[in-house]
Every structure is written in structure tokens, then in C-alpha cells.
Image (cartoon, rainbow, N blue to C red):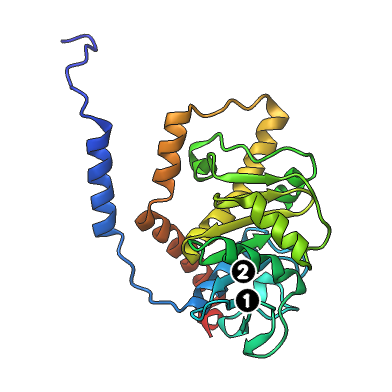
């Protein structure tokens, strides 16, 4: 007997990381081939099921193929009833180029983010209850848990509330406050997540509400302790790896399709 003496040598963590990344890239392959508007409709539905709906508030947009254009759902629909065919293509003044209906007039600040951030292809903005509650107390989002580490030093805070964001001033203010980060908590308003892909923006928005809920629970119970910076940065990058992130989106999409049927994609 060795009485618990450690006989197994540690391999460097980076070896496991490289192997895990290779395995995930090879095994987490995707079968579904959804179009841009189908992915946007799936995003609307998965967020609705997580409680992101608030009357007609919130917009899910994607950059169009032609520069200066974006896809957005026609105004007047709740997140839980959006289909792929409800998306319209608008120009950089919100004029409709393709499809019927009008965009939400509060969609203008998305255009500012696409102009400022060449890396962003999708913006998801919602007002879910825990995010909204956090936005009312003047406290930024704190990423202090492994499951929400994708926000570690990657979530901005806009403490100023400009009112309904229908003008250019709000677009300038929000895109400037976002800076080079992927997400932002908007005081007295909600969350915004800007992704390199639709999948990334969707998963960030989904987990933003979880992060806000966890933060409010933790704040009610005690003082939140910060993540150690090196581990926090590592966990942030790990959470944003493309293959498992896409697999997470596909999991939430399967839940939508099992619950609501293929008509979401029509
Ligand atoms: Zn809003």
C-alpha cells in the first residue's frame, strides 16, 4: 500500500488541451445545414424559451452579404413566433430591400456596431428579467463561474441610459461602450451580444441571462469572489472554442425543433 502517496505524474495541462481541441474538432461535426435566416429564427426561439421575450423588445440581426445591409425580423412579432421567412433585409438607413414589413425602429444601433466592428456578423439584443434586474442596480456583469467565463473581461458596461435607442446618438454611445468586447450590459435596458458567428452571438446571449441570474443569487447570499485572472482568461477562451460552441447552439436548436416543429425553419 502506498497510503495515498501520489505515484501518477502530471502531464502539462496544455497537452490535454491540444488533444481535447483536436478531438472536439474531429467529433463534434455538424449535420444540419441551416441558412442565415433559419439560424436567426432558431436563435429567436431558443432565447424565447429561456425567457428573453419582453413584449416586442429585442432584435436578432445578421450582417447581409452586400456591405451596409443586415437581416432583421419584421417588427411586430414576439421572439417565440418568429419564422425564418419573417426576416427582412434592410440597408444602413433601415429601408427595406427584401421582404415585407418594417424593421423595429430601435434597430438602428445594430448598424453602428456592424460599422464599427468588421469581425461581427451577428448581434443579439434582448431584455430578459435577470439581465434587466441587474441593469437596474448600477452593477456590471461579473463573470465569476466556470459556466459564464465566456464573459470574463469580455463584457462591457454602459452606465448611461439614453432612452429608447431609435437615433444615431444611441448607436454611437452603445458601439463606443462595447469597444472590442463581445457583450455589453446596458443600464436600465438589457444585454447585447455581438458574435463572429450567429452561433456565437446566440450562445453568448443565452448564457448572459444565466450569468445575471447566478450573479443576483450570489449577491443575495454573500460577496462574489473574482476568478483568478490566468484561469479566467483560459476558461474564457475554452468556452469560446468553435466546435463545442457550435455543438451547444445545435443542442438548443434541437430542443426548439423537437418542441416547436420544422415550421420554425420555413
Ligand atoms: Zn432594447
Left or right: where 79 falls relative to 54: left
Give the residue displayed 73% in from the left and 83% down from the top. Answer: 102
| Residue count near mark 2 (Cα–Cα under 10 Å), binned few <14, some 14–19, many ≥20 | many
Q: Position of residue 166 (x, y in %)?
A: 78, 68
Q: Nearer the viewer, residue 238 or 119?
A: 119
Name the residue: 23% across, 30% down.
12
Residue name at image x 30 percent, y 64 percent: 29
Please provide percent x and percent y for residue 120: 51, 62
With respect to residue 115, does 38 lie above or below? below
Which of the marked residues, 1 or 2, is nearer the chain's N terminus?
2
Q: Can you tell which quarter of the image residue 70 is in?
A: bottom right
Say whether residue 64 is left or right of residue 219: left
Q: Which mark is residue 188?
A: none
Q: What distance separates the C-alpha of mark 1 from that of mark 2?
A: 6 Å
Residue occupying the point 27% across, 46% down = 20
In the shown orientation, is residue 104 left or right of residue 207? Answer: right
- Which of 119 and 204 lies nearest the eye of the viewer? 119
Q: In what element is the residue under mark 1?
A: strand
Q: Is residue 2 visible?
A: yes
Q: Identify the image quadrant of the N terminus.
A: top left
| Residue holding disc 2 | 60
- Residue under pointer 1: 72
Asked whether 112 or 136 is in front, the reply is 112
In the image, residue 187 lies at what x, y percent? Answer: 76, 48
Mark 1 residue's CB less than 8 Å from ligand 1: no
Q: Are marks 1 and 2 in contact (CB under 8 Å)?
A: yes
In the rendered image of this protein, does residue 195 appear above or below residue 111? above
Q: Quadrant of residue 40?
A: bottom right
Image quadrant in which you'd find residue 43: bottom right
233, above or below 120, in the image = above
Confirm or reject: label 2 Cβ below 8 Å from ligand 1: no
Circle 2 SS class = strand
Amino acid at each position: 500500500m502506498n497510503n495515498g502517496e501520489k505515484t501518477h505524474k502530471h502531464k502539462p495541462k496544455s497537452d490535454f488541451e491540444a488533444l481535447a481541441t483536436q478531438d472536439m474538432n474531429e467529433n463534434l461535426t455538424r449535420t444540419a445545414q441551416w441558412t442565415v435566416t433559419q439560424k436567426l429564427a432558431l436563435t429567436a426561439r431558443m432565447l424565447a424559451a429561456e425567457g428573453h421575450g419582453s413584449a416586442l423588445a429585442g432584435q436578432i440581426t445578421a450582417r447581409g452579404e452586400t456591405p451596409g445591409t443586415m437581416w432583421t425580423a419584421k417588427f411586430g412579432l414576439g421572439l417565440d413566433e418568429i419564422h425564418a421567412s419573417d426576416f427582412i433585409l434592410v440597408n444602413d438607413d433601415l429601408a427595406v430591400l427584401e421582404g415585407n414589413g418594417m424593421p423595429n425602429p430601435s434597430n438602428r444601433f445594430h448598424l453602428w456596431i456592424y460599422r464599427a466592428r468588421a469581425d461581427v456578423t451577428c448581434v443579439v439584443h434582448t431584455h430578459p428579467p435577470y439581465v434587466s434586474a441587474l441593469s437596474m442596480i448600477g452593477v456590471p456583469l461579473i463573470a465569476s463561474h466556470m459556466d459564464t467565463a465566456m464573459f470574463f473581461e469580455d463584457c462591457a458596461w454602459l452606465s448611461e441610459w439614453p432612452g429608447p435607442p431609435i437615433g444615431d446618438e444611441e448607436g454611437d454611445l452603445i458601439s463606443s461602450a462595447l469597444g472590442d468586447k463581445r457583450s455589453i450590459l446596458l443600464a436600465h435596458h438589457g444585454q447585447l451580444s455581438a458574435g463572429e458567428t450567429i452561433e456565437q452571438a446566440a450562445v453568448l446571449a443565452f448564457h448572459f441571462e444565466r450569468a445575471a441570474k447566478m450573479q443576483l443569487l450570489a449577491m443575495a447570499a454573500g460577496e462574489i469572489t473574482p476568478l483568478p485572472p490566468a484561469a479566467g482568461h483560459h476558461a474564457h477562451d475554452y468556452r469560446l472554442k468553435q466546435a463545442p460552441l457550435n455543438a451547444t447552439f445545435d443542442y438548443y436548436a434541437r430542443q426548439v425543433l423537437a418542441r416547436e416543429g420544422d415550421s420554425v425553419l420555413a
